[in-house]
């Protein structure tokens, strides 16, 4: 780990959201006590850059990041499909973290690491261009205008996301909230660091070929809400022709 000149300071971050749900079953509590510490991403002190590849037993060929993985089904399925990649999942909801850790144990997965906390300090600690794909799937929409500053998509998080995504890396956002679609496109269309993949309506109406349905998505569809799939590419940095 080294401290680069442009390393951002980890400022205090206000968190708005639910951290605990139903009481955990004893086995889930044991998993949190025993297995989670072995999977947990330890954030370095402010100003020090994390080496994410070193979190895994073997250096992964790609690093994928999921912010707000809920109960972790999507993260687990992607990790099963791509055993050579490393996956980092962030979630503040303790019951969701316990569900993910249970699946990691059951399926004996060695390529997932977990931050059971707010994703933003992790984003600040990651090196530039270290992430090959990032997922933000059905983020809390915070639909009231006065709560808009709590939405994950916003100028500060997009700047950090642009810093950590590699050239050509994909940022995948899905939502069932029309207001959040509008908000996301307002922030990302014309953004200097991102390009929207869509050329036709099927590009946002239909899921990408490798899509894994999430728990929240199933609930949204059952309630009659239409998911929207937004895929953005991190533009190549100037002078980098890779
Ligand atoms: C509506 S749920 C969707 C969960 C899952 N992605 C799915 O589609 O089933 C949004 C999740 O994002 C988590 N979340 C929101 N902001 C977060 C943040 N800054 N860092 C980590 N997790 C966050 C919440 O705890 C919640 O579990």
Image (cartoon, rainbow, N blue to C red):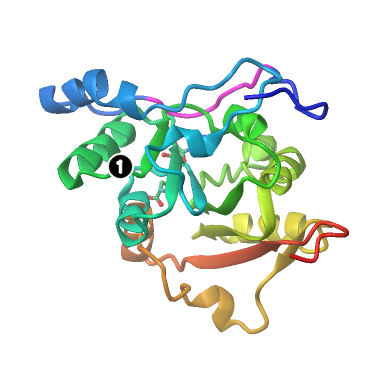
| Residue 47 position by quadrant | top right
Quarter of the image that includes the C terminus: bottom right
Give, as a single range, the part of the protein colored magenta: 12-19
Q: Is residue 138 above or below residue 23?
A: below
52 left or right of 58 in image? right
> Image point 47% across, 66% down: which residue?
227
Secondary structure state at the residue bearing disc 1: loop
Image location (x, y in percent) of residue 97: 33, 33
Image location (x, y in percent) of residue 133: 56, 55
Give yes or no for residue 237 being in the magenta stretch.
no
Q: Is residue 48 above or below residue 60?
A: above
Quarter of the image that includes the N terminus: top right
For label 1, the residue is 110
Image location (x, y in percent) of residue 86: 43, 47
> Image point 55% across, 82% down: which residue?
202
Q: Is residue 11 above or below residue 94?
A: above
171 left or right of 31 in image? right
Residue at far right of view: 239
Magenta stretch, overall SS: loop
Q: Who is closer to the viewer here, 149 or 202?
A: 202
């Amino acid at each position: 780990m080294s401290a680069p000149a442009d390393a951002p300071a980890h400022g205090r971050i206000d968190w708005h959201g639910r951290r605990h749900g139903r009481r955990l079953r004893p086995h889930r509590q044991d998993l949190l006590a025993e297995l989670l510490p072995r999977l947990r991403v330890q954030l370095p002190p402010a100003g020090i850059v994390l080496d994410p590849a070193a979190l895994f037993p073997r250096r992964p060929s790609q690093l994928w990041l999921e912010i707000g993985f809920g109960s972790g089904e999507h993260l687990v399925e992607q990790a099963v499909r791509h055993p050579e990649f490393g996956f980092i999942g962030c979630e503040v909801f303790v019951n969701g973290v316990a569900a993910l850790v249970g699946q990691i144990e059951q399926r004996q997965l060695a390529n997932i690491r977990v931050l059971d906390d707010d994703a933003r300090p992790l984003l600040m600690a990651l090196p530039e261009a270290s992430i090959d794909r990032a997922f933000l799937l059905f983020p809390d929409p915070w639909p009231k205008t006065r709560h808009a500053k709590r939405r994950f998509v916003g100028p500060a998080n997009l700047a950090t996301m642009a810093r950590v995504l590699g050239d050509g890396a994909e940022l995948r956002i899905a939502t069932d909230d029309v207001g959040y679609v509008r908000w996301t496109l307002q922030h990302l269309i014309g953004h200097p660091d991102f390009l929207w993949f869509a050329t036709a309506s099927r590009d946002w109406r239909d899921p990408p070929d490798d899509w894994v349905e999430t728990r929240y998505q199933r609930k949204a569809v059952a309630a009659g809400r239409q998911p929207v799939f937004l895929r953005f590419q991190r533009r190549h940095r100037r002078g980098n022709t890779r």
